[in-house]
Image (cartoon, grey):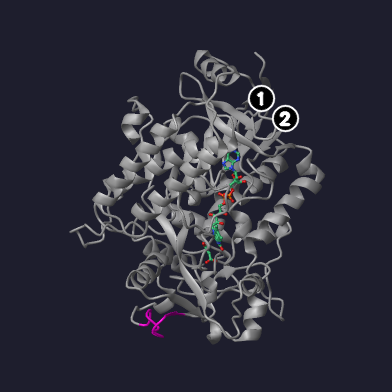
């Protein structure tokens, strides 16, 4: 077969904080005789993680006002009761270790003059417990330390092979539902490779780019999720998409730079174009849970008002020091926070749902694991508590390593008839190919449909409209397994993930957390652990399940 074949002890897909940290910890076990392959669709440091601003939750002994029980209560309350108590408790209990280990990896969290850690506040947290780096550059700070370690610490780097600009396009499943590896596609050389390992980890991040307005970078197109859906892994909670209330909203621009919730944590207030501070009536005021604030802003915008952040309550010197990147980005866009309000509107930010996993990343498919935003451990429930995501990435990646380092990680190339048939598709020269402007046009259409119909407020009619419009796009872009460009694969994956979200949203008739059904008669908040799961046992045609 003309395709290259390679074997490793473990394949890690994705180089955000979840994938990088898993790679480092697994390399450090020295139980990877055939090495780790870290493959990533763009450059090593491009991902959602890099842009994280507010921080990472640290429930630390030294923070006397905080406790595990307080953090667990805040997380479950923000998640409207749909979080799994045991998962929340486990992740909270492991927070101290996660933070200490990040520091050991070279992460320098911000400290005050007395050299004590600085804790900040975000929406729905009852105490200050969020650690940050470089003021508002937490993701960049953590990601940089982990990348440095992977590239420059020889005990780690000697065990890791890195493939950049390489997309995992399909999981290699055998006839017994065992994952044997992945097929990868190098978007620069257009070469395919069959990659085999006893363990495959999807750390592929979220789905933000399926929406017109998002805080997520362009790589975040739900690719790993789409792979798992195609492989019929169990998928959970996809109706819960978090819309961040305060993204910078500029005339004539679709891009949405985040204005961190910690800006409100440090005192900024939301104000409308009539000069009204409209969050004052809520018990938690501007720091109400994200879904609540996003809907309040949406209501203001829908009634014709504009919405701004008034940062004057923070003080200019403090703002410049505490939020240097936000200050700079605003200034570059002619917003001088010393005299101007910051125009904001909500934008798609985080996917609470994902590949259903245990806290160690175990999925419903043997040998396949998932961690980070691609996974759904049920930590977040219906609405993620701010800064819990980075913590979840670190704790679950650590648990993944704990689990798989006990396995025999000698590589093996197991090819049965089913695996062989998958490989043959990609070795075959026949493939879908279309003009890139055409594909990007379809992407833009999809993003509009999702924003207009599957956004902050949903109804059955809007969801069915979205489904029918997206099915029309699917007809214009036949779902051949093999594509020819990164854009085509992304569109294929975005279509699949969007349909999955819509079906989950149709399935949940009541409003809860980030899923708001304007047509719901049921005003009570359901505590039911209802979820929309594609069963691995379900052998019906995929198009029937998701179309
Ligand atoms: P990512 O960091 O998104 O990494 C995914 C990786 O997978 C990327 O390298 C991508 O290129 C790669 N990839 C995807 N699919 C494939 C494929 N098929 N083949 C190969 N590679 C693939 N959370 C917090 O807790 N605190 C914060 O302060 C915070 N601020 C945020 C600010 C912004 C602007 C954004 C966008 C998010 C923020 N979040 C925050 C959320 C948090 O950053 C993410 O949930 C988290 O970083 C996800 O990490 P990850 O490793 O799972 O995925
Ligand atoms: C922010 O800084 O507002 C983002 C925090 C998060 O998404 O957890």
Residue 35 horizontal/vertical position (percent) = 72, 32
Mark 1 residue crowding within 10 angstroms, few (<14) / some (14–19) / many (20+): some
The outermost residue toward the left is 521
Q: Nearer the viewer, residue 97 or 466?
A: 466
Question: In what quadrant of the picture does the C terminus appear?
Answer: top left
Q: Nearer the viewer, residue 353 or 242?
A: 242
Q: Nearer the viewer, residue 487 or 518?
A: 487
Q: Quadrant of residue 325?
A: bottom right
**Residue pictured at 31% horizontal, 48% vertical:** 505
Residue 18 horizontal/vertical position (percent) = 60, 48
Residue 277 is inside the magenta segment: yes
Q: Which mark is residue 534?
A: none
- Please tell me which of labels 2 and 1 falls first in the chain: 2
The stretch of residues the image draws in magenta is 270-280
Query: Left or right: 172 with respect to 46?
Result: left
List the residue tagged with mark 1.
Answer: 411
Q: Is the stretch drawn in magenta largely helix, strand or loop?
A: loop
Q: Is residue 323 above or below residue 177?
A: below
**Residue pictured at 59% horizontal, 61% vertical:** 52
Residue 130 horizontal/vertical position (percent) = 56, 69
**Residue pictured at 68% horizontal, 50% vertical:** 45
**Number of dots carrying numbers:** 2
Residue 89 horizontal/vertical position (percent) = 46, 57
Q: Is residue 522 above or below residue 231?
A: below
């Amino acid at each position: 077969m003309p395709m290259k074949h390679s074997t490793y002890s473990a394949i890690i897909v994705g180089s955000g904080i979840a994938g990088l940290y898993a790679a480092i910890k697994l390399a450090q076990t020295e139980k990877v005789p055939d090495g780790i392959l870290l493959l990533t669709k763009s450059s090593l440091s491009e991902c959602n993680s890099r842009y994280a601003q507010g921080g990472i939750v640290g429930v630390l002994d030294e923070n006397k006002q905080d406790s595990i029980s307080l953090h667990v209560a805040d997380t479950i309350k923000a998640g409207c009761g749909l979080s799994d108590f045991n998962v929340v408790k486990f992740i909270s209990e492991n927070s101290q270790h996660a933070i200490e280990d990040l520091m050991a990896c070279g992460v320098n969290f911000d400290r005050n003059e007395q050299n004590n850690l600085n804790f900040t506040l975000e929406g729905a947290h009852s105490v200050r417990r969020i650690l940050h780096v470089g003021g508002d550059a937490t993701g960049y700070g953590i990601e940089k330390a982990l990348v440095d370690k992977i590239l420059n610490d020889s005990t780690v780097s000697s065990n890791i092979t890195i493939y950049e600009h390489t997309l995992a396009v399909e999981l290699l499943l055998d006839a017994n539902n065992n994952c044997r590896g992945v097929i990868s596609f190098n978007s620069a050389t257009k070469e395919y490779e069959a990659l085999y390992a006893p363990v495959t980890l999807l750390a592929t991040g979220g789905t933000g780019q399926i929406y017109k307005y998002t805080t997520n970078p362009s790589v975040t197109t739900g690719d790993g999720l789409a792979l798992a859906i195609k492989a019929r892994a169990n998928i959970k909670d996809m109706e819960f998409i978090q819309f961040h209330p305060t993204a910078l909203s500029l005339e004539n621009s679709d891009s949405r730079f985040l204005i961190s919730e910690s800006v409100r944590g440090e005192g900024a207030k939301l104000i409308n174009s009539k000069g009204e501070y409209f969050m004052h009536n809520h018990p938690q005021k501007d720091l109400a849970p994200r879904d609540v604030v996003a809907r309040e802003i949406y209501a203001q915008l829908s009634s014709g008002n504009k919405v701004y952040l008034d940062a004057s309550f923070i003080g200019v010197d403090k703002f410049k020091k505490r939020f240097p990147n936000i200050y700079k980005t605003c200034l570059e866009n002619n917003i001088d926070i010393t005299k101007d309000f910051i125009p904001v509107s909500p934008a798609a930010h985080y996917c609470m749902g994902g590949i259903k996993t245990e806290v160690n990343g175990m999925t419903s498919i043997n040998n396949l694991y998932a961690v980070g935003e691609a996974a759904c451990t049920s930590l977040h429930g219906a609405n993620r508590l701010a800064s819990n995501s980075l913590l979840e990435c670190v704790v679950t990646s650590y648990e993944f390593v704990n689990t798989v380092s006990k396995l025999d990680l000698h590589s093996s190339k197991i090819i049965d008839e089913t695996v062989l048939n998958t490989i043959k598709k990609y070795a075959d020269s026949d493939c879908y190919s279309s003009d890139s402007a055409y594909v990007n046009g379809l992407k833009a259409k999809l993003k509009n449909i999702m924003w207009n119909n599957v956004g902050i407020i949903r109804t059955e009619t809007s969801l069915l409209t979205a489904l029918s419009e997206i099915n029309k796009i699917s007809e214009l872009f036949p779902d051949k397994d093999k594509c020819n460009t990164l854009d085509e694969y992304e569109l294929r994956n975005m279509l699949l993930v969007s349909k999955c979200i819509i079906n989950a949203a149709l399935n949940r008739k009541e409003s809860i957390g980030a899923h708001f059904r304007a047509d719901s008669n049921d005003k009570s908040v359901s505590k039911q652990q209802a979820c929309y799961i594609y069963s691995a046992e379900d052998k019906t045609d995929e198009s029937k399940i998701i179309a």
